Image (tube, rainbow, N blue to C red):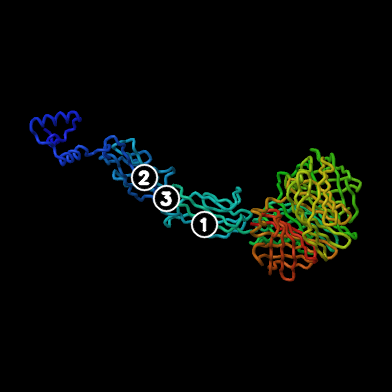
Amino acid sequence: MDRNRENGCGKSSPSQQLRTRTSLQKRNWKPISLASIVVCFLIVCTGCGGSSASSSTDPVTIVISPTTVTLPVSTSQQFSVSIGNSTNTNVTWQVNGTTGGSATFGTISTGGLYTAPSSVPATAITVTAIAQADTTKTATTTVTVSNSTKIVVSPAQSTIAAGGQQTFSATLGGQVVSATWSLSCQNATAGACGTVSQSGIYTAPLSPPPGQSVSVVASSTNNTANAGNANVVVTFGSGTLFGQYSFGLAGLDAGQPFSSAGSITFDGKGGITGGIEDVHGKGAPITITGGTYVSGADGRATATVHTSSGDEGWEIVFVNHARALVTRVDSVIARGELDAQDSLQFGKSLNGALSFQLAGSTGSAIPVSAMLGGLTLDAQGNITSGALDSNNGGTLSTNVPVSGNSSISSSDNGRGTLTLTSSLGTQQFAYYVVSSASAKLLEIDGLRNLSGTLGWRTSTTTAANYSGAYAFIFSGANSQGAVGQGGTFSADANGNVTSGTFDLSTDTTFGLGFLFAGSFVVSDPAIGRTIATFNVGGSTLQYVVYPPNLNNEIAFLEIDNQNVTSGTAFRQSSISSNGSAPSISGQFAFGAGETSAVVREAISGIISPAAAATGTLDLNNNGNITLGTSLQSSQFSVTSLSGRGSLLLQAGSYKASYTTYILDNNNVLMLQTDGKGVLSGTMRRQY
């Protein structure tokens, strides 16, 4: 009999237990005591309530630790596992699917000691533990291998002028190593950081990138070391001016109106190799025979331009490689711009839909003349339709039909001629191509002193072409002297002008912040002629307007018999964010000028608007020339969501207050508004 039965603890059914008890009574056996029943119950019920944890039906579990790890090359990491529901705790270790690992991805011992490879592999590393008790049960961890050493790039810090070169070397543990070279900077445009050869020769870009900083990076060719880098500060230099440039200048020469346009070539090394220049009243173009220029790291350069009519002195302020501001610093008081020419456009006839904008000086009581028009030319350069509007010293000629033609005079410098025939006579102009969108334009017949721009536009105009936000500056004169107008406005797709703010400046007075509304009404969709009306306070100002050209610029000419003003409205980008006034930062080139009966002045220089008293000014004040004067104070602020603000400049004896209008992060218009002169101009971001 087993123990259970010896203790009366059999697992028989109740009926069986009853029969047994009856049988025992008949045999005079003693009854089972209560204590014996309790003992029996405990023995029988041991393990009651379900299966135990060691039941063979439970699945095997596996957990690995750590789950992620980063290791330098050739170093080790111990991994451990925990096996559940099995007495077999053995595992098989794999690295990227290979038992025991490999030299490429690292090796692992049977005890879980992982050793990283000697170089960083190209793909990710996964360590896997496989339970031998149940090979379908696995646990994985991710290993990141990094280089424990870093390439050293020499020299670590460099300052290089635009277009200059520097050779860099890469060493590891003091030994020169081959490397893969690359560049990074804040501008993602191809070539904006410069170039670097695979032998480590770095060539700086022709314009400094934003912040002026470039990182020269040397990477390991076999992933045995971390990449190293050197920092380069790129400055302006002689190399910034390289290639052919179109230029246009306007001002006064010995008290008489002056204007010129041409093409000039810089060699990027401080030399001027040639060019051509048309000068108002000179007849045939003159030859630029050579010259020199000296560039500073701050973005200012002084040039002596040799021509067949004598030398010219230029003070140049770089915006970037493609654009610069120019002030004449000799007996001529003039200013203008240099723009890099696209030689692919040389030799092409003018054709398509164009608009032109011209201004100049006269000897009349109102010493300003301006002309505006729209043209359509066929593939041979013939004008098939066109009209112009003119305000010559207060004498208006509006919506005058125009005929004429254009021709190419030189495929070497982008020069051509444009003839306009109207009731005003036959006028001849020279143009110098800048790009497929614009050209410099100069009257060369001696009738009027007009210069300006020629731009391509949309072929058909509607009011919707004017929709958007704009900032503008118009300049000119009336019988009392110089007049400047500036401001901002918005226009909807129906031609309604809203949210306008208008500023007025003269030689002796100024008025700021006039609110205005108005309209654009298209009078000739084919050539783009439009009438704009601004209701400013108690005055109604009326302008003839031509639609935005490919540079998003609108040309204006005042035709209301109050003033002779003309200028440009520039479309603004989204300059306000989060309901706060916009801001600008960085270093800017600036240039401004005026020709009036009171002041004849041209200035240029550099300024950091966000930093007080930071900048340099070059001034030609009625022939008194001062160069390189440091700003003593500079106060710039923006208070309007439309980008309208103020700028105070003081350098030496020069002090002027301007109202400013932000176009975007890189461009700001400026109009003098202090009653001491009426200079107008631009600020353009250098970097």
- SS class, disc 1: strand
**Alpha carbon distance from label 1 to label 2:** 32 Å
Query: Which residue is more in the foreground, 307 or 488?
Result: 488
Q: Earlier in the sequence, mark 1 or mark 2?
A: 2
- Name the amino acid type tagged 1: Ala
Task: Give percent across and percent down for residue 165.
Answer: 58, 55
- SS class, disc 2: strand
Task: Give percent across and percent down for residue 333.
Answer: 79, 62
Quarter of the figure with the N terminus: top left
Residue 281 in view of the camera? no
Sort mark 1 into few (<14), some (14-19) or many (20+) by Cα contacts within 10 Å. some
Q: Which mark is residue 230?
A: 1
Task: Give percent across and percent down for residue 326.
Answer: 74, 58
- Name the amino acid type tagged 2: Gly
Between marks 1 and 3 in the image, the one whose residue lies nearer the viewer: 3
Q: Which mark is residue 113?
A: none
Count of marks overlaid on the render: 3
